[in-house]
Amino acid sequence: MPIEKNQLRQVMGHFATGVTIITTLNKAGQMHGLTANAFTSVSLEPPLLLISVDKKAESWPAFEESRVFTVNILADDQEGLSRKFAVSGGNKFEGVAYRVGANGAPILEGALAFIECTLYAAYEGGDHSIYLGEIQQAEIREGKPLLFFRGGYRALGD
Ligand SMILES: Cc1cc2nc3c(=O)[nH]c(=O)nc-3n(C[C@H](O)[C@H](O)[C@H](O)COP(=O)(O)O)c2cc1C
C-alpha cells in the first residue's frame, strides 16, 4: 500500500534543500517561472541536471513546449521572490529584476547561481514531468543560500 500524501510531504520535508526559481519561455515567447526544490545534479559527461514540474502548474505547458530552461539558485535574501514564484499564475516577472539569458529564459538578478539548460529529455513522473537539462552556461556569485526544511524557509546556521 503506497504512502499517504500528507505523510509523504512530511517525510520529504525532512530533506533540507536549497530553493530555486526555474524559468522558461513558451513558443510565443512569454516568460514563465516557478519556485522549485525538486532539482538535482545528474551527470558530468554530458553535463545534466534534473527538475520535476507539477502537471497542474500553470507554467507546466510552457515547460512542455519549450526546449530551454534556467535554474536560478536563490540567495538568503530572496525569500520574497521565492514566495512570489510559488503563487500560481499571473505575470510573476512584474517588478522583478532580470535579464534574458543566452538560451532566452530569464536570469533573475541577485541569484546565488544560474544554470542555463537546453532540454535533453523529458520523462513521465506521475503527476509531475521530469525534465533533464543539458547545461550550456552557468555562473555563481558570493553569498549564502536560501534553504527549505520541514515546510519553512531557513538560513545557514538556523
Ligand atoms: C520551497 C518550494 C519548493 C517547490 N518545489 C516545486 C517543484 O520542485 N516542482 C513543482 O512543480 N512545484 C514546486 N513548488 C510549488 C510551485 O512553486 C507552485 O505550485 C507554483 O504556484 C507553481 O506556479 P505556476 O502554477 O504559476 O506554474 C514548490 C514550492 C515551494 C514553496
Image: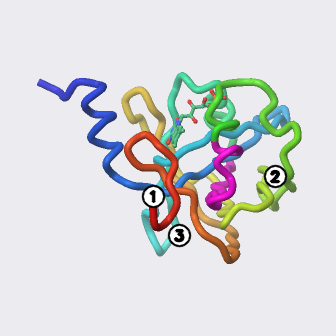
For the residues labelled 2 and 3, say whether their Cβ atoms are less than 8 Å apart. Answer: no
Q: Is residue 66 above or below residue 40?
A: above
Amino acid type at image mark 1: Thr
- Picture quadrant of residue 158: bottom left
Magenta stretch: includes residue 73: yes
Magenta stretch: includes residue 111: no
Amino acid type at image mark 3: Pro
> Which residue is found at the position 50% from the left and 31% from the top?
54
What kind of element bears circle 1?
strand
Q: Which residues are magenta?
A: 67-82
- Picture quadrant of residue 83: top right
In the orientation shown, which residue stands out farthest toward the bottom?
A: 142
Q: For mark 3, what is the residue?
A: 47
What kind of element bears circle 2?
loop
In the orientation shown, which residue stands out farthest toward the front?
A: 158
For residue 40, the mark is 1
The total of numbered circles placed on residues is 3
Count neighbours of disc 3 (C-alpha within 10 A) and say few if under 14, some if 14 to 19, many if 20 or more. some
Count neighbours of disc 2 (C-alpha within 10 A) and say few if under 14, some if 14 to 19, many if 20 or more. some
Count neighbours of disc 1 (C-alpha within 10 A) and say few if under 14, some if 14 to 19, many if 20 or more. few
Q: For mark 2, what is the residue?
A: 104
Position of residue 128 measured from the top left corner of the image (x, y, whole percent): 45, 32
Q: CA distance from mark 1 to mark 2?
A: 22 Å
> Which residue is found at the position 52% from the left and 60% from the top?
155
